[in-house]
Image (cartoon, rainbow, N blue to C red):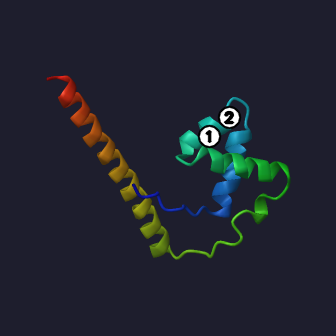
């Protein structure tokens, strides 16, 4: 099984995600689910924001062109769909065996 390609997030997206995670009633897990990002990633951003280093997160990443960003998004989506398809195949085989 292949890994889902690494996502690249803008500085503004990280800041808004941290604001959402730090509001009352919305925790890191809920905010990550709403934004469709990894809970671990968001937790790292929140930790960096509390330490005052959120601006430094992602500085080593080169800026992507619009086409590169779209290609990365499509690759992530394709990898996720392939994983879901493989899971459904396994479930189908399991339930077909159980019904006999």
Residue at image x 47%, y 74%? 68
Figure check: 91 above or below 69: above
Crowd tier of the residue under label 2, counting other residues whose Cα lies within 10 Å: few below 14, some 14–19, many 20 or above:
some
Hey, which residue is sitting farthest left in the picture?
A: 100
Question: For mark 1, what is the residue?
Answer: 31
Figure check: 33 above or below 67: above
Does 11 appear above or below 38?
below
Residue 31 x/y as whole percent: 62, 40
Q: Which residue is mark 2?
A: 27
Q: Which mark is residue 48?
A: none
Label 2 SS: loop
In the displayed structure, would residue 76 be above or below residue 33?
Answer: below
Residue depicted at 52% across the width and 46% down the height: 36
Question: Image check: 40 left or right of 52?
Answer: left
Q: Which quadrant holds residue 26?
A: top right
Horizontal relation, residue 21 to residue 72: left or right: right
Residue 93 occupies which quadrant of the picture? top left
């Amino acid at each position: 099984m292949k890994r889902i390609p690494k996502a690249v997030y803008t500085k503004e997206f990280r800041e808004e995600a941290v604001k959402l995670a730090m509001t009352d009633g919305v925790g890191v897990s809920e905010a990550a689910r709403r934004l469709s990002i990894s809970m671990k990633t968001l937790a790292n951003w929140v930790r960096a924001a509390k330490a005052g280093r959120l601006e430094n997160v992602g500085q080593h990443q080169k800026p992507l062109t619009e086409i590169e960003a779209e290609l990365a998004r499509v690759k992530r989506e394709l990898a996720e769909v392939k994983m879901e398809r493989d899971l459904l195949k396994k479930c189908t085989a399991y339930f077909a065996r159980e019904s006999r």
